[in-house]
Image (spheres, rainbow, N blue to C red):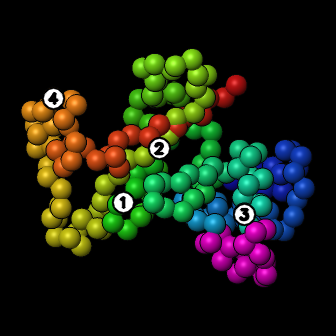
């Protein structure tokens, strides 16, 4: 955090407590940390704290946009202190490692819905899935998926209504969009 965490809480009208400060430090110290890992880090720093107190502190900090909550499919919620910018996440489908990636297009929103259906869109989330370099090395570079070019060729050979099963990109390969727009 760029400024003193206690001052940041005060500026937002949030009561400064040892628990909230420890939670902020835990999230700042380990991007994409789970609530359970936050609880472990906070206990190591200040002693006893209930998991419910950790969730309460995380909830207040998320609501005040001091930290961000992400929840990749099939994974527990994760928290990070990188807020207010336009970044996305790359998730290893083998080990679950999550890394930040800057938006390739530019300022928010980097993805605009083709039809907003009358919604006032204020956020989109992008999650890229693959294998991290360590998991690729551990597998000997082998992939259990056909190359993307083969998937595209197979999917293109069928009418759109028949593109199901292994020839169509899986749900996990589809993009989930989430971008915050400041008002």
Nearest to the eye among marks 4 and 1: give it: 4
The spot of residue 91 in percent (x, y) is: 40, 56
- Position of 101 with respect to 171 (left or right) is right
Quick one: label 2, few (<14), some, or many (20+) residues within 10 Å? Answer: some
At 71% from the left and 44% from the top, the residue drawn is 65
Q: To which residue does mark 3 refer?
A: 55
The spot of residue 68 in percent (x, y) is: 63, 49
Quarter of the picture containing the C terminus is: top right
- Position of 176 with respect to 108 (left or right) is left
Of the numbered discs in the image, which one, if any, rests on residue 2? none
- Position of 152 with respect to 128 (left or right) is left
Secondary structure mostly seen in magenta is helix
At 16% from the left and 44% from the top, the residue drawn is 167
Q: To which residue does mark 1 refer?
A: 92
Q: To which residue does mark 2 refer?
A: 88
Q: CA distance from mark 4 to mark 2?
A: 32 Å
What span is in magenta?
36-53
Q: To which residue does mark 4 refer?
A: 159
Nearest to the eye among marks 1 and 3: give it: 3
Identify which residue, 126 or 80, lies in the foreground.
Answer: 126
Q: CA distance from mark 3 to mark 2?
A: 23 Å
Q: Decide which of tag 4 and tag 1 comes sooner along the chain.
A: 1
Query: 144 above or below 168?
Result: below
Label 1 SS: strand
Q: CA distance from mark 4 to mark 1?
A: 31 Å
Nearest to the eye among marks 3 and 4: give it: 4
Query: 78 above or below 39?
Result: above
Q: CA distance from mark 1 to mark 3?
A: 25 Å
- Name of the residue lying farthest toward the front: 161
The spot of residue 155 in percent (x, y) is: 15, 37
């Amino acid at each position: 955090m760029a400024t003193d965490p206690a001052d940041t809480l005060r500026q937002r009208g949030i009561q400064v407590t040892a628990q909230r400060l420890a939670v902020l430090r835990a999230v700042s110290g380990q991007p994409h940390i789970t609530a359970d890992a936050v609880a472990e880090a906070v206990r190591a720093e200040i002693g006893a704290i209930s998991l419910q107190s950790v969730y309460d502190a995380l909830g207040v900090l998320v609501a005040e946009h001091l930290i961000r909550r992400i929840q990749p499919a099939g994974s527990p919620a994760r928290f990070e202190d990188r807020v207010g910018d336009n970044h996305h996440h790359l998730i290893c489908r083998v080990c679950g490692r999550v890394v930040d990636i800057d938006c390739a297009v530019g300022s928010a929103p980097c993805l605009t819905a083709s039809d907003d259906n009358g919604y006032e869109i204020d956020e989109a989330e992008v999650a890229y899935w693959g294998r991290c370099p360590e998991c690729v090395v551990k597998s000997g570079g082998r992939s259990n998926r056909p190359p993307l070019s083969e998937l595209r060729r197979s999917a293109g050979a069928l009418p759109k209504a028949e593109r199901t099963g292994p020839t169509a990109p899986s749900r996990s390969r589809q993009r989930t969009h989430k971008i915050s727009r400041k008002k």
